Image: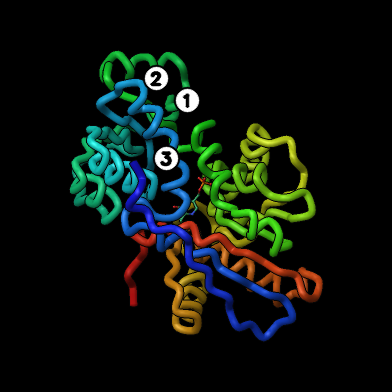
Amino acid sequence: MFDHIAFPTPYQTLDLPAPVQLTVKRLDQIHPHISGNKFFKLKYNLLAAQQQGCSKILTFGGAFSNHIAATAYAAQRFGFQSIGIIRGDELASQVLNPTLQTAHDFGMQLHFVSRAEYRLRHEAAYLQQLQQQYPQAFIVPEGGTNALALQGSQEILSAHDRENHDVICCAVGTGGTIAGLIESSSDRQHVLGFSALKGDFLQQDIQQWTDKKNWSLTDAYCSGGYAKTSPALLQFMQQFEQQYAIPLEQVYTAKMMMGLFDLIQQQHFPENTRILAIHTGGLQGKLKTY
Ligand SMILES: *Cc1c(COP(=O)(O)O)cnc(C)c1O
């Protein structure tokens, strides 16, 4: 089913003026539409949907959800219909942003719901109602995070990554990807998450998926919250891209990289630490301001 995905994943080691080694694992390059972590999160969900004979994939997301765009593409590619329950009924009367337009172009039916209704997205009764409304649908939660996504995310790190790096960094949204990285990391490695949103609740969300303790999370670089940016973030993103020729986007990967560069500059890591930063993709949602 996934033969067209590019493996092995390219790596890029950055030339830094600091005594640490930083390598980027370019999951953004595995596929133009199911890029980055979303491929790993969707993989076993799509296989399960196929095995269960479902003809539709139904999932949830906000207006900037890379998961929505990736699911729309993957569903179409593998012969499913797709339905996106989108947060914010005011969006129904607006021009679609690039993420939602991409999803629409790949055939996803977009259902805009009020914030109050969207809040029910984890409630059993609401899910049952959706299941009755769409009897053939395989329901994938917001951001794609469930046990099957965890299984896929555990395939991001290779044996080589486990042996040759001391710190693994990634951007965090719902926490599914980092939980898979933690579960598949070696115990002598530390997994460091850079949250794209504010708040302590993510700590517990991640703990639901793993008992391991070799990880930490910071929201110090989230620029005020999910999908929020700052002039400093956009400036960092532009400078980084020019210097290293690696595209970032403002919702996740630029926040991670800005945080990581700040920690390196503060000498947070001991000398010769071998850092692996996971580029989780998401470039379809990139702001094009320059
Ligand atoms: C969705 C996404 C994330 C967050 O993944 P979670 O598993 O929800 O934490 C990180 N980076 C990019 C580029 C994403 O699209």
Q: Position of residue 197 (x, y in %)?
A: 55, 51
Q: Is residue 63 visible?
A: no
Give amino acid for label 2. Answer: Leu
Q: Position of residue 92 (x, y in %)?
A: 22, 40
Residue linked to disc 2: 127
Residue linked to disc 1: 122
Give amino acid for label 3. Answer: Lys
Judge left or right: residue 60 versus residue 275. Answer: left
Q: Of callouts 1 and 2, which one flags the residue occurring earlier in the amino acid sequence?
A: 1
Q: Secondary structure at mark 2?
A: helix
The quadrant of the image that shows the C terminus is bottom left
User: Residue drawn at (43%, 47%), measured in percent from left and top?
Assistant: 38
Q: Residues within 10 Å of mark 1 (few under 14, many from 20)?
A: few
Asked whether the residues under the numbered discs 1 and 2 touch, taking CB atoms below 8 Å apart as contact, a structural biologist would say yes
Give amino acid for label 1. Answer: His
Asked whether the residues under the numbered discs 3 and 1 touch, taking CB atoms below 8 Å apart as contact, a structural biologist would say no
Cα separation, mark 3 vs mark 1, equals 21 Å
Q: Residues within 10 Å of mark 3 (few under 14, many from 20)?
A: some
Q: Label for residue 43?
A: 3
Q: Residues within 10 Å of mark 2 (few under 14, many from 20)?
A: some
Q: Position of residue 239 (x, y in %)?
A: 48, 81
